[in-house]
Amino acid sequence: MANPPKVAVNGNTTPANPSLQDDITLALLQNGGIARIQAALRQRLDEAGWSEYLRNYVTGLFRSGECTTYFEAMEKVKAQVKLQGRDDEEGAPATGGLVIPVSAAEGAVGAVTRELREVCEMKK
């Protein structure tokens, strides 16, 4: 399958431009970039033990009766998720929150950057 043309991005276009965002999203969907970004983040979270911690947390919510529906559990998870500060220790969250390790976030940023370079043409 031929690669779609790159999306032109220049200094006159703001990041909040819905049309530009749609073009980039479509290009990433067409070339499989979004799936690769998701896989890279998932891999980093798995390597850090975060995915297992999340599974255990959600399982505990249902077993304790604190949550009885998917939507209740999702709200609890969203309220607990935080990005680890650069000065914090890596590993299991000590504060009880679902702390995303910096290493996982940095890996995701790298994946996004690589994929954007594939679909965007930067102009000055």
Image (cartoon, rainbow, N blue to C red):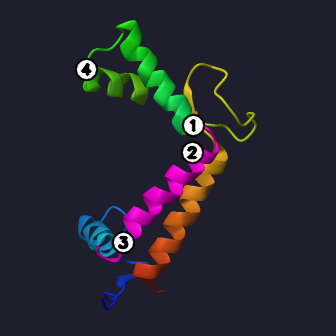
Residue type, mark 2 in image: Asp
Splitting the image into 4 quarters, where does residue 2 fall?
bottom left
Q: Position of residue 117 (x, y in %)?
A: 49, 78
* Residues under numbered marks 1 and 2 in contact, where contact means CB atoms less than 8 Å apart: yes
As measured in the structure, the alpha-carbon distance from the residue carrying label 4 to the one carrying label 2 is 25 Å
SS at mark 4?
A: loop
- Relative to the observer, which residue lies in front, 79 or 62? 62
Q: Earlier in the sequence, mark 3 or mark 2?
A: 3
Q: Residue at x 29, y 75 (%)?
A: 30
* As drawn, 17 above or below 70: below
Q: How far is disc 3 from disc 4 in space, using C-alphas?
A: 32 Å
Where is mark 3, residue-wise? 32
* Residue 60, x across and y down, in percent: 45, 16
User: Where does the magenta region start and end?
Assistant: 30-49
Name the residue beneath numbered marker 2: 46
Find disc 1 in the rendering and name its residue: 50
